[in-house]
Image (cartoon, helix red, strand yellow):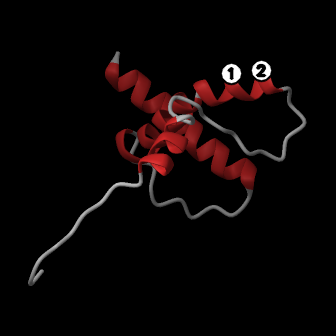
Amino acid sequence: MDGEVKISIDKEKFNQDGKWDGLKGYITNTNLTKDQIIENYGHLWKIEKAFRMSKHDLKIRPIYHRLQRRIEAHITINFVAIRFIKN
């Protein structure tokens, strides 16, 4: 940046924005109750961890199957194999 730079803070907007601090919103298309939605969101890290594990630790890629039943069988076989190896 060249030249003089002026910075200002709109204190009114800053204070209005501060009213939302600590609040979290959820948007969903499900029929779950608000308590169920919040509880399920709290378990999201478990789902993300499972996907990371299935892609990385199990080394199940590539999957050349097209039918869901065969994909699930492929993943199950890899999961069982890794459990035997780690025990």
Disc assigned to residue 39: 1
| Callout 1 secondary element | helix
Q: Residue 1 sits in which quadrant?
A: bottom left
Is 7 rendered above or below residue 78?
Answer: below
Horizontal side, residue 69 vs residue 16: left or right: right
Horizontal side, residue 29 vs residue 41: left or right: right
Callout 1 amino acid: Glu
Q: Residue 24 sits in which quadrant?
A: top right
Disc assigned to residue 65: none
Residue at the image point whose x is 24% and y is 63% from the top: 7
Q: In terms of depth relative to the viewer, which is nearer, 20 or 66?
A: 20
Task: Residue at the far bottom: name it.
Answer: 2
Residue at the image point whose x is 30% and y is 60% from the top: 8
Q: Residue 72 sits in which quadrant?
A: top right
Estimate the x, y position of residue 39 in percent, counting from the top left: 68, 21
Quadrant for the C terminus in the image: top left
Estimate the x, y position of residue 71 in percent, counting from the top left: 64, 51
| Callout 2 secondary element | helix
Disc assigned to residue 35: 2
Task: Residue at the far right: name it.
Answer: 31
Callout 2 amino acid: Asp
Q: In terms of depth relative to the viewer, which is nearer, 9 or 39?
A: 9
What count of labels does the image hold? Answer: 2
Asked whether the residues under the numbered discs 1 and 2 touch, taking CB atoms below 8 Å apart as contact, a structural biologist would say yes
Estimate the x, y position of residue 59 in percent, counting from the top left: 38, 47
Distance (Cα) linking label 1 and label 2: 6 Å
Task: Residue at the far top: name it.
Answer: 87
Q: In terms of depth relative to the viewer, which is nearer, 2 or 58?
A: 2
Residue at the image point whose x is 74% and y is 29% from the top: 37
